[in-house]
Image (cartoon, rainbow, N blue to C red):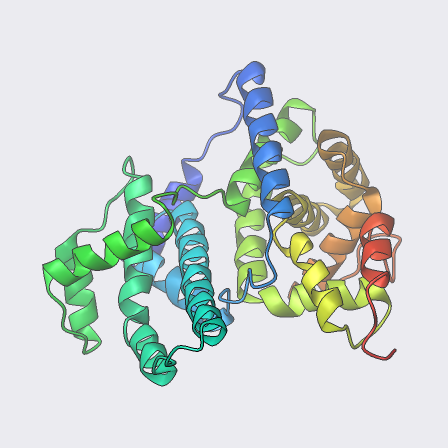
Amino acid sequence: MDGPVRSRLASLSDFQFGAVATETIEDALLHLAQQNEQAVQEAAGRMGSFRETRIVEFVFLLSEQWCLEKSVSYQAVEILERFMVKQAENMYRQATVQLREKKEPQNWRALKEQLFSKFLLRLVSCVQLASKLSFHYKIISNVTVLNFLQSLGYVHTKEELLESELDVLKSLNFQINLPTPLAYVEMLLEVLGYNGCLVPATQLHTTCLTLLDLVYLLHEPIYESLLRTSIENSVPSQLQGEKFVSVKEDFMLLAVGVIAASAFIQNHECWSQVVGHLRSITGIALESITEFSYAILTHSVGANTPGRQQPALPPLEARALRAAPSSNT
């Protein structure tokens, strides 16, 4: 077994549950729920457009090569996502102002090429920034980053690397300590352990990491299947897709879906108990949890969740989406 994989497995085995006081867990869970609610409410139509499979895979492989813990790879993806969305929004805003004021339009092809030419540098900067947020584990040095870029044929100076980090920080108003689905998964597993879940939290944790990777890598197919099911239409309209963005940004929903799917894989006889606990803890409808776990299992092992051949999306979300005009009308 090579070094990076061995190091990654060692970090997973060191993870411990049941070492935190219940009062602390309650406060932390409430804080995460409030963060999640705010993120869902603020979800914009263009959010999620840069969580593409190739980009996510590159970040995951790079994080593994640099022996970073899993939380760093997820956070790097989220930082990069927010940064690229900001860049796209700024370009759109500039174009709108120029059109309104009838100014000479900028050379958008040149701006696009400039954005693409710096994309790898920005991606690596996001990974490096994410590693600095978990400084108790490992920070990636500038020398390591520059050597990596040079191995791919990209020559940069330390000054350019620092400028790239600063560009990302300024674009996000230095707010880069973003919540990730992993934080929600691990917090819910902690609560499940205290609630007497029949499947051990450490056992679920390992499977959850694998399935969470899968959801990130198959982000579009999984969420597209959820959308089609929710509107009972194989061809969603643009407006229906925009309304569904809030579901894509709901990390609490993603976390319960991942845990439920993991429980089914680990011990399907205990699946109902785990889902019941998740519903009680989060207040998320049983249909929602079943729907998400079904989608994850279908795209991973091709299995169905117990007792539901074609689970339905939560009624509230389904009603909201069906209210949007269909592409067929």
In percent of width and height, residue 148 lies at 20, 66
In percent of width and height, residue 69 lies at 37, 47
State left or right for residue 327 relative to residue 192. right
**Residue placed at 50% from the left, 20% from the top?**
20
**Residue placed at 22% from the left, 51% from the top?**
140
Identity of the residue furthest to the front in this view: 101
Above or below, 106 against 77 in this view is below
Q: Quadrant of residue 31?
A: top right
Tally the marks.
0
**Residue placed at 35% from the left, 57% from the top?**
64
One can see residue 1 in this view:
no
Above or below, 4 against 36 in this view is below
Q: Quadrant of the N terminus?
A: bottom left
State left or right for residue 242 relative to residue 69. right
Above or below, 83 against 152 in this view is above
In percent of width and height, residue 219 lies at 59, 64
Q: Quadrant of residue 146?
A: bottom left
**Residue placed at 39% from the left, 54% from the top?**
76
Which residue occupies the foreground of this view, 134 or 48? 48
In percent of width and height, residue 212 lies at 56, 54
Which residue occupies the foreground of this view, 160 or 251? 160
State left or right for residue 306 relative to residue 262. right
One can see residue 178 in this view:
yes
Q: Quadrant of the C terminus?
A: bottom right
State left or right for residue 116 relative to residue 269. left
